[in-house]
Image: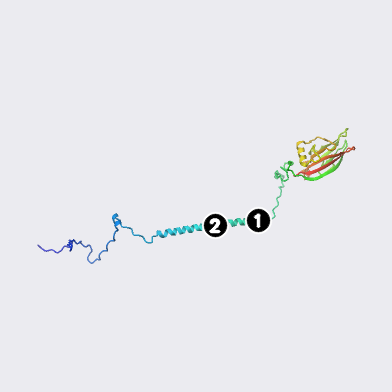
Amino acid sequence: MSTQGPNPNVASSGPAGSLRQPSATPPGAAPPSPPPAIPVADAAQGRPLARPVVGSRRSLIVPFALSVSVMALLIAFGSAVFAWRAIDQAEDAKEIALAGRGDEPQLERRAPTNPTDLTESTDSSAGNLGGPTASGQPPRLDERTVYNIKYEDQTLTLKATETESMELDLDEPRANVRDEADIRLEVEYGTAQRYLELVEDVQGSEGAGPGSTPYDCAEKIRTAPLGSSRVPVKQGVVICVMTSFSAAQKRGDPQRMVRLEVTGVGADQAVTVKVSAWDIPR
């Protein structure tokens, strides 16, 4: 039986009697470094424990994003404050400019020259409700109408005959006129009875008192117009007369309210009257 040397692939028993594992390291090569130790907790689950990341990027990104957001909010707030101040300063400048223009002369407003452009006035400051319009209608009169005195207690003497009357212009006043008469004195043939009669387009009423106001006369004419009736002449008779609106318009003169009182009747057919007149607002 031949003698063989030791088999390199068979582990020999060491001093403790254990078998020696075959070496996988080639001859002359450095021995491999031992594998890292696996923690017990992860080794039990079969995966290695992740290494802690020192100086993680998330720890840097989050504070930076917060800083940028805060800066953006501050910039937006500053812009809003600046815009508000700019608007406020613009309003102040506008008020100053408007206040400075208060002393400038205002352009005169001219009335329309075309009569069709005229509109009915509703200004009651002068007591005139619905003044004259392009249609040629006279103003409405009421308790708020303000009358301006034309003349007061003017005394005139009228004389007439059975064949010839005498007219009276109440706008001046003036007796013995033809073209601009408002009232006439007539004598009835055969009786010598004298009458006062209104001319065309003149309105009036009798039954007023010596102290009747223009408003009283306007109400008398409205409620008890005289029309074409004649008023017998006798002392103490009071007649309210509103002159012709169309005639006043043609003259460019105000229409007038007149109070006429008969103060005397003579045997020679002379009649004395006392008259007062007021301008009717246009």
Position of the N terminus, as image quadrant, is bottom left
Amino acid under label 1? Ala
Q: Which of the 4 image quadrants contains residue 224?
A: top right
Residue 98 screen position, x and y as percent: 64, 55
- Badge 1 marks a residue whose secondary structure is helix
Q: Is residue 35 above or below residue 213?
A: below
Q: Which of the pair 271/130 is nearer the observer? A: 271
Q: Which of the 4 image quadrants contains residue 242?
A: top right
Question: Between disc 1 and disc 2, whose residue precedes?
Answer: 2
Q: Which residue appears at 40% of the width and 59% of the height? A: 59
Q: Residues within 10 Å of mark 1 (few under 14, many from 20)?
A: few
Q: Which residue is mark 2?
A: 81
Residue 175 screen position, x and y as percent: 85, 42
Q: Which residue is mark 1?
A: 99
Left or right position of 159 against 81 = right
Amino acid under label 2? Val
Can you name the residue that lies furthest to the right here?
A: 268
Q: CA distance from mark 1 to mark 2?
A: 27 Å
Q: Which of the 4 image quadrants contains residue 251?
A: top right
Residue 212 screen position, x and y as percent: 79, 40
Q: Is residue 119 above or below residue 231?
A: below
Left or right position of 122 against 42 = right
